[in-house]
Amino acid sequence: MTYDVVALTHEPPDARTLLDALRAEGSGLEVDAPEHGNVLQVLDEDGAPLLAVEASIPIRVEGEAQRLLGPFAAGLPAPVWWTEVRAAERPAAVELADAFADALIERLGGRRWSSERPE
């Protein structure tokens, strides 16, 4: 089971913002950006996967974020950009996912939703 985090940002995150947020949260990380893919993979210094960061998608319909995430997203005005992060079941990956999403929100405004932390 993965740990999932969604950053709902007021501004669209571009590639530079995504990479800056990752760099701010960890040194020794490697980012693999497949040429024809929509998922960034974040690897630790040994090449083991930590995070998968999906391409951001705009949510343009008022109330859609609340429909998908429940009361957490109540009152969040559209549009918002949905950036989903999946973390490996490792404490370091879970911490990195939260820190990365928080760094995006700090830069672009918004809110962070997360699934239940793995035990």
Image: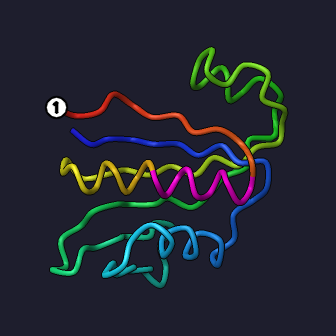
Mark 1 residue element: loop
Name the chief secondary structure element in magenta.
Answer: helix
Q: Amino acid at mark 1?
A: Glu
Disc 1 crowd rating (10 Å Cα; few below 14, some 14-19, many 20+) is few
* Residue that extends furthest to the top in the rendered view of this protein: 71
Whole-percent x, y for residue 97 in the image: 40, 53
Q: Residue at x 83, y 36 (%)?
A: 78
Drawn side of residue 78 relative to residue 51, left or right: right
Indicate how the structure is coloured in the image. rainbow
Assign the N terminus to one quadrant of the image: top left
Whole-percent x, y for residue 111 in the image: 65, 38
Drawn side of residue 80 relative to residue 3, left or right: right
Whole-percent x, y for residue 16 in the image: 64, 78
Whole-percent x, y for residue 18 in the image: 58, 69
- Location of mark 1 (residue): 119
Residue nearest the viewer, comparing 75 with 40: 75
- Using the image, determine if residue 11 lies above or below residue 78: below
Assign the C terminus to one quadrant of the image: top left
Look at the image and say whether residue 103 sits in the magenta stretch: yes
Look at the image and say whether residue 68 sits in the magenta stretch: no
> Residue 12's image quarter?
bottom right
Q: Residue at x 53, y 42 (%)?
A: 6
* Residue interval drawn in magenta: 99-108
Drawn side of residue 84 relative to residue 104, left or right: left
> Residue 51's image quarter?
bottom left
Figure label count: 1
Q: Residue at x 42, y 80 (%)?
A: 34
